[in-house]
Image (cartoon, rainbow, N blue to C red):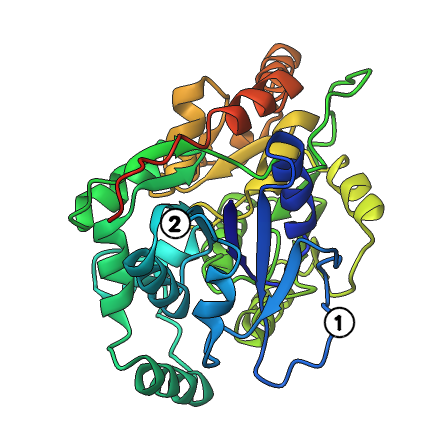
């Protein structure tokens, strides 16, 4: 049995469908819910293989173990948090299982930032809200351990780190003692599909800055540099999606953009439907992502497929991944020095990026990833 511990998020539905396609009737998805859950998920579609579970309630582990009658399982932790690490460690004490960490990004980088081992923000670090601190204290009391201990113990005993970017695996190995192996995995976003036709992107006057009001987007770093290089005010539109994220990001970004790039600055505060959003991305000629870590990957791959010129931070492991794969992608610090650097990719470079995208998200590639994900479990109990 494949046991998945997940959160109530949109892409879990697709994840369930894919696992069922390649490992039919072998998957149970335990969706983390609150202690006062009365039924009804926000995003996840219920079925007989989807089970709501409050991980901090007494009996949560026993409920999971009921689905492991043969005394073994493949355990998948989708986005690692302290409570999930604790649950995983307790399960591994009782049955024979292989642990798989389905890596997202923030689940490692936030730990490293707290340890002082990685810098995510250019101008200050987000403070932990009081409510969050109280929830963390409750978790520590409930679990009888400190916040870091279950996560670090889980990583030490981890079997597989599952992600598509091996540079993040190397970062894990650099900072944590673990014998975990790297396993290639991605959810495969539905928005990335091989299209019947491809037309060259010619919208060099439409610029995108980030994909959300992420606390790690470093919006002001991007906007201030655009102001610096656009001496003649030739940029027509700078779109900044701010429909979701932190108000601590939204307000300063709007204030700065309005004061310094008023002739081009367009904050996007309203939600768009998926079709409208991807239609909007089709018009973007140049895109900037200010994150120092992998974030907004679906947006970035989609933009590369449309022919947009994409600038990333050199500290971002996604930048190194894309460069290694042969994509034409640009370093925000060294490749953006003046207005002329906003020139669009040539038709040949746009087509080259598109071909790499089609290979990376092909059905053949998806098949190989899922078919090679799970290895047989040893019959020897831990």
> Is disc 2 placed on a helix, strand or loop?
loop
Q: Distance between the residues labelled 1 and 2?
A: 36 Å
- Residue 336 appears left or right of 99: right
The 10 Å Cα crowd at callout 1, few under 14, some 14 to 19, many 20 or more, is few
Please state which of the two labelled residues, at mark 1 or mark 2, is closer to the viewer: 1
- Residue 138 appears left or right of 230: left
Q: Where is residue 284 shown, x and y percent of the image?
A: 71, 37
Viewer can see residue 170: yes
Cβ–Cβ under 8 Å for marks 1 and 2: no
Q: In the rendered image of this protein, does residue 76 appear above or below residue 200?
A: below
Q: Quadrant of residue 361?
A: top right
- Kindly give the residue lying farthest to the top in the view shown: 348
Q: Residue at x 58, y 41 (%)?
A: 26
Q: Which sits earlier in the primary sequence, circle 1 or circle 2? A: 1
Q: Residue at x 50, y 22 (%)?
A: 328
The 10 Å Cα crowd at callout 2, few under 14, some 14 to 19, many 20 or more, is many
- Residue 243 appears left or right of 80: right
How many dots with numbers? 2
Viewer can see residue 335: no
Q: Residue 149 carries which label?
A: none
Q: Where is residue 365 shown, x and y percent of the image?
A: 57, 19
> Is disc 1 placed on a helix, strand or loop?
loop
Looking at this view, is 59 or 284 the one in front? 59
- Kindly give the residue lying farthest to the left in the view shown: 177
Disc 1 designates what residue? 40
Q: Which mark is residue 292?
A: 2
Q: In the rendered image of this protein, does residue 31 appear above or below residue 178?
A: below
Q: Where is residue 379 shown, x and y percent of the image?
A: 31, 37
Looking at this view, is 378 or 69 the one in front? 69
Q: Where is residue 103 shown, x and y percent of the image?
A: 43, 47
Looking at this view, is 189 or 289 the one in front? 189
């Amino acid at each position: 049995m494949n046991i998945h511990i997940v959160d109530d998020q949109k892409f879990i539905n697709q994840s369930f469908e894919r696992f069922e396609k390649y490992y039919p009737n072998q998957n149970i998805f335990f969706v983390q819910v609150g202690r006062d859950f009365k039924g009804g998920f926000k995003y996840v579609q219920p079925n007989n293989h989807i089970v709501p579970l409050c991980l901090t309630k007494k009996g949560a582990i026993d409920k999971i173990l009921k689905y492991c009658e043969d005394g073994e399982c493949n355990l998948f932790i989708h986005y690692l948090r302290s409570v999930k690490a604790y649950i995983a460690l307790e399960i591994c004490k009782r049955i024979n299982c292989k642990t798989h960490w389905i890596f997202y990004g923030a689940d490692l980088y936030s730990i490293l930032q707290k340890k002082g081992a990685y810098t995510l923000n250019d101008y200050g670090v987000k403070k932990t809200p009081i409510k969050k601190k109280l929830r963390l204290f409750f978790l520590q009391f409930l679990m009888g351990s400190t916040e870091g201990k279950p996560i670090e113990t889980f990583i030490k005993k981890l079997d597989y780190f599952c992600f598509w970017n091996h540079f993040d695996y190397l970062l894990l190995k650099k900072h944590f003692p673990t014998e975990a192996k790297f396993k290639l995995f991605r959810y495969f976003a539905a928005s990335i599909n091989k299209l019947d036709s491809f037309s060259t992107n010619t919208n060099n006057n439409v610029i995108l800055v980030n994909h959300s009001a992420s606390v790690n987007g470093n919006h002001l770093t991007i906007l201030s540099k655009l102001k610096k290089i656009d001496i003649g005010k030739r940029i027509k539109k700078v779109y900044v999606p701010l429909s979701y994220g932190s108000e601590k990001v939204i307000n300063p970004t709007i204030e700065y953009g309005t004061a310094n790039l008023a002739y081009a600055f367009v904050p996007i505060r309203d939600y768009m439907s998926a079709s409208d959003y991807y239609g909007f991305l089709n018009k973007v000629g140049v895109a900037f992502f200010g994150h120092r870590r992998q974030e907004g990957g679906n947006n970035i791959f989609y933009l590369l497929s449309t022919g947009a010129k994409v600038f990333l931070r050199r500290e971002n492991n996604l930048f190194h991944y894309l460069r290694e794969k042969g994509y034409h992608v640009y370093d925000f610090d060294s490749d953006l020095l003046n207005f002329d650097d906003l020139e669009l990719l040539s038709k040949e470079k746009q087509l080259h990026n598109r071909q790499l995208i089609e290979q990376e998200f092909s059905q053949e590639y998806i098949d190989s990833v899922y078919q090679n994900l799970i290895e047989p479990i040893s019959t020897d109990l831990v």
